[in-house]
Amino acid sequence: VTSTSHTPKSISRREFLKLAAAGTVGLLAGCSPASPSSPTATSPPTDLPVPADTVAPTSTPTATETPELTVTPEPAVDVGRPDIIETYPDVPSKVIRAQHAGVWDGDDLVPAALREMLDGSMTALTGLDSAGAAWAALFAPDERVAIKVNAIRSSSFWTHVPLVMAVVESLREAGVPGEQIAIFDRSTLELENAGYPVNKDGAGARCCGTDLQDKAGWQLMGTDIKLSNILLSCHALINIPILKQHSMAGISFAMKNHYGTFDKPSSYHQGDAIQRGMAELNALPPIRDRTRLIIGDVLNIVKSGGRSAITGDSILMSFDPVAHDTIGLQLFSEAMTSEGLNSHVAVAKKFATPWLENGAGLGLGTGDLNTIELMEINL
Amino acid sequence: MLDASITKLTGLDKAGDAWAVLFGPEEHVAIKVNAFRNSLIWTHVPLVIAVTDVLQEVGIPAENIVIFDYWTNELRTAGFEINEDGPGVRCYGTEEAYTRDWEVSGLPTALSDILLGCDALINMPVLKSHMISGITFAMKNHYGSIPAPGVLHRNIGQCIAELNALPPIKDRTRLIIGDVLAACVNYGGSFPYWEPDWIGDSILMSFDPVAHDKVGLDILTQLRMEAGSSPDSLIDMATSCLESAAAAGLGTDDPANMDLVEVNLE
């Protein structure tokens, strides 16, 4: 080995990435939804540094030996859940799948179609007659609502902005002021890169990253972790992930999306850590108790480590993250099979089954199709 | 730095002779850089250009040289000038062009058609710490020569060894030039996972990927200690990779079997 050194004269650092900015605003500081009472806030981080992709059919997942699942108690926080939210075991967990043949217009999503999908899903999920009444039953005008999207930089496909904007619009129509709504992921830069209009403290819905503004007080698998201040500052949480292939979790969807809500996602990707970590993270009271709604973005089904995607035309909606992700796994499998990628299906099921089972074991919901009520809406 | 290294490495008097001994004018040479998108530290463009210059000086047509990594967009972001089919040195990503014909750790594996299309390979990684493999340097750099690197992060020591032992990689590798003009000593927990948190002034050069990476690990270990953070986890993770690679016959991880030659230039 030859090691050659040279007294540096002018070593130029490479330019940082030029991030496509939709909207403006700088970095740093924390954004938070404005509070009718007492605000707090800031925002969070997500996924894995590992390049993802799955081609192999027969890899061996790390063995899961009946893990000892643990959940750390949460410090006192005033969070409530409307009675209208019912899931297994009280009732079969509903998962609504709304498909719309006209949701895409070329490369663009059609806002009106997205609203129809959301409205149809909301009424089916809640059993109420009107979408407005359903949104109002779930979210009160004096509440702060956080919306967790997936904008991770390692992908080229993210939770679609028009879908999130349609949700924001619905919330506002239900009386929640825009300033009390915070779209977040772990980093403002990532949100900008994913096309979100960053707004830390201006008028309208707020949108920014946690940007390392996390709060300590919880443990995951015996290790101290911190949770996003944006999450903690809100009364209600809407989880809007996008359906993705994931090399270690099989798929990334609602439960995996919260790897962008805490400070140490990369420490919980290996073997047993991801299988237990995903379940236990979602069972932490600040996440579990705030989650009012899960809206799964299946407008793309992302594969090849985030580098390519199959175009979809549906969204999922549920109160139950396990049921939601179970149906997500089905949709992912169907999409891969349609492309002849049968090996992807085997790998996804092999890796996803343990954390789905762990999630069910912690009482987060059900992964049993016999206790899931899948309702399909075709528009 | 390149000229001094190549003469020391080959034992020849002149750099030109050394390059000419390694690369014939009729050969196609692929240069694997690290332009990974989750990072803000990449193989430095001027260093790579200096290599393509010397290759041309020994008679290799520019059009027979290709700088590559996983994706064209990543190369562009890392500052490389893309040239897919024009005059001059070529530079582009493998994109979707892979040939599936191999197996790593029991998993079907494809290799970049750019790599497979060349006679000789120069591996030019940049030194980074890594949360799973301890370090990413020469051997880990070939995770950008395959389409599904994610699945090879399980049992990573064995996977890195087996990947580098695949004949198309092992047999084509003529030279390894490690970029230590900067390093990422402490990887991050979110994007960008790797930033240049240390500026260096050296390169490594070797024929042996294991020895090369062992020296890289030693550098990172020293830098971590100087930065006041423990190198233990890096050493633990990287050691399993190095041991597996040595056991696969890729080289040596034993300093007693290495000849570390240091060249200091003003």
Image (cartoon, rainbow, N blue to C red):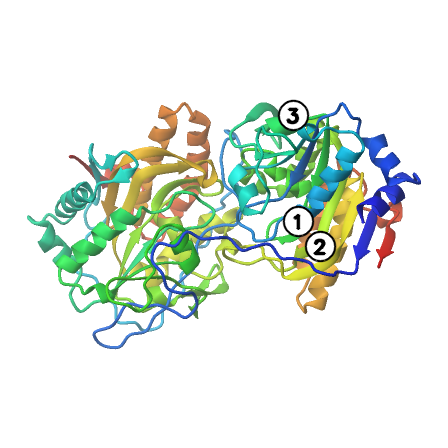
What residue would you read off at disc 1?
B44
Looking at the image, is B148 positioned above or below residue A229?
above
Check the residue under mark 1 and report the chain it is in.
B
Mark 1 or mark 3, which has the lower sequence index? 1
Q: Can residue A3 be seen in this view?
A: yes
Q: Which mark is residue B181?
A: 2
Give left or right: position of A85 versus A209: left
* Amino acid bearing label 3: Leu
Name the residue: 79% across, 57% down.
Answer: A6
- CA gap, disc 1 and disc 3: 24 Å
What quarter of the picture does the C terminus of chain A occupy?
top left
Looking at this rendering, what residue extends furthest in the front direction?
B87
Mark 2 or mark 1, which has the lower sequence index? 1
- Percent x, y of residue B264: 85, 56
Towards the viewer: B167 or A9: A9
- Percent x, y of residue A160: 31, 46
Residues at discs 1 and 3 in contact (Cβ within 8 Å): no
Looking at this rendering, what residue extends furthest in the left direction?
A129
Marks 3, 2 in one chain? yes
Name the residue: 52% across, 58% down.
Answer: B189
What residue would you read off at disc 3?
B116
